[in-house]
Image (spheres, helix red, strand yellow):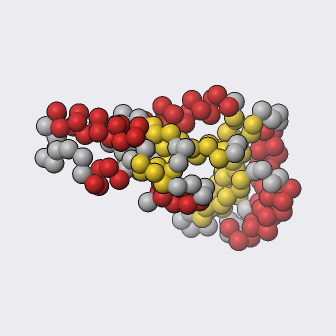
Amino acid sequence: MTNKGIAIGLDKELILNKKALKLIENAYNKLNQMGRLKLKGMSDERKKMAYLPREAIPLLNTEGTAPGVQIKKDMTTIFILPGIPQELKAMYKNYILPTLKEKKEIFIHKGFNFSKIGESQIAPYINKLKEEFPNLWIKTHPKKGPNVEIELSITCYKEINCEKRVDIVLEKLKTIILDLDGDVN
């Protein structure tokens, strides 16, 4: 369903990818040789995993049978990975991390917890900061009791001062929370 949804979103036809089919066949043949499967051969359900958006590149799944998918749209690279954690982690390590390193992208993620004031009390200030720093992702997560976690993230592409921007916003948020009589943890 994910491949179909991405294909629709990118206005690309969903087609049987012969390379993906070969990866799936190899994975099931290996499992058959190990005696781990009762149903041998390619069923329609197994073959269905080989239908990818046109121009997609299938990615070897070293931990399972469903191939991952890489597809580009303009300047964006989209990865579609299996949902099984062991498979997802292996594919992230084998494909996504090398791609990020190659593009020299910097991902910065910081945050802190605060208490004594609610999430809704800080929301208007966060909205103003989002306008001032549109490339910065700011998200709050209510926790048990009057505790709230706040996260800030940014992905920078060959830009300077990315971390400085995050630190500036963190300090502004801490000052706002303290001015509202909140506690910063």
In screen coordinates, is 171 left or right of 109? right
Can residue 114 be seen in the rendering of this structure?
Answer: no
Who's the residue at 69% across and 34% down the image?
105
70 left or right of 115 in image: left
Q: Quadrant of the N terminus?
A: bottom left
Which picture quadrant has residue 166?
Answer: top right
Q: 96 and 66: which one is in front?
A: 66
Is 86 rendered above or below residue 52? above
* Number of marks in picture: 0
In the image, is residue 21 above or below residue 134? above
Residue 19 placement, left or right of 8: left
Residue visible at 67% across and 58% down in the picture: 139
Left or right of 55? Residue 135 is: right
Position in image of residue 185 (x %, y %): 66, 51
Q: Is residue 15 visible?
A: yes
Give x and y (percent) for residue 18.
40, 40
